[in-house]
Image: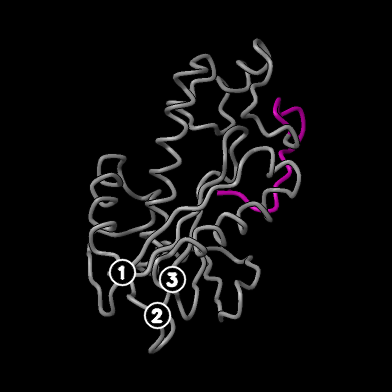
Amino acid sequence: MLLDHYYEGKVEAGCDEAGRGCLAGSVYAAAVILPVGYQNELLNDSKQLTEKRRYELREIIQRDAVAWAVGIVTPEEIDKINILNASILAMHRALDQLQVRPEAVIVDGNRFKKYKDLPHTTIVKGDGKYLSIAAASILAKTYRDDYMNQLAEEYPQYDWRSNKGYPTKKHREAIRQYGTTPYHRMSYNLLGDGQLSLDFKD
């Protein structure tokens, strides 16, 4: 069972993102505030769950959460500010949209920039340790998957329905054959001719 809070006696928002290591598409982040003492034995890091279970849990999270929101940063913005800053900006945008103001923030990973005047803590593999971060990982992942599935209808040759924009062999071969789309991150090494340079990866 994951932990229900990090900060004692504070309204706490958990944050996580999806799509950092992708060659195409926006990066998505979610912020979730769960009720005090909340329990759900099914919640876990979204990468540990089946697609079906993630979507089932999305409905439960949205029903049970005190507040939740999703923030988005576009490929154009990623190219301007880099993926690390874009991931943090997406989390800030999600926090901005919460209908309940948090008093503290816990974040999956090891990098974050202060949000307003709130205390925050970064937690490596936090999506497998804290319920609110796990919930945020599920929302970010499923809403981004929905977005990539929509883009896949417009650009089926890149196999985005399957790879969700990640650098699979089929995706890179499609870039070689068809070129790039408006949704590709042009600051990335799209053809994989060298090491893909990221501040961090999923």
Image point (68%, 16%), residue name: 179
| Above or below: residue 169 compared with residue 142 | above
Q: Earlier in the sequence, mark 3 or mark 1?
A: 3
Q: Earlier in the sequence, mark 1 or mark 2?
A: 2
Amino acid type at mark 3 = Ala
Image point (56%, 27%), residue name: 168
Report which residue position mark 2 lands on: 11
> For this view, does 189 lie left or right of residue 105?
right
Number of marks in the image? 3
Q: CA distance from mark 3 to mark 1?
A: 10 Å
Element on which disc 2 rests: loop
| Above or below: residue 105 compared with residue 171 | below
Range of magenta residues: 189-202
Q: Which mark is residue 172?
A: none
Element on which disc 3 rests: strand
* Residue 36 rendering spot, x and y as whole percentages: 28, 79
* Dominant SS type (magenta): loop
Image point (32%, 70%), residue name: 34
Report which residue position mark 3 lands on: 13
Q: CA distance from mark 3 to mark 2?
A: 7 Å
Amino acid type at mark 2 = Val
Between circles 3 and 1, the one closer to the viewer is 1
Q: Which mark is residue 66?
A: 1
Estimate how packed mark 2 is, as few (under 14), some (14 to 19) or many (20 or more) residues with alpha carbons within 10 Å: some
- Was residue 119 drawn as part of the magenta stretch in this picture? no
As rendered, which of 191 and 132 lies closer to the eye?
Answer: 132
Q: Residue furthest bottom?
A: 9
Assign the N terminus to one quadrant of the image.
bottom left
Residue 132 in which image quadrant: bottom left
* Residue 26 rendering spot, x and y as whole percentages: 57, 40
- Find out whether the residues at labels 1 and 2 contact each other: C-beta distance under 8 Å: yes
| Above or below: residue 46 compared with residue 1 | above
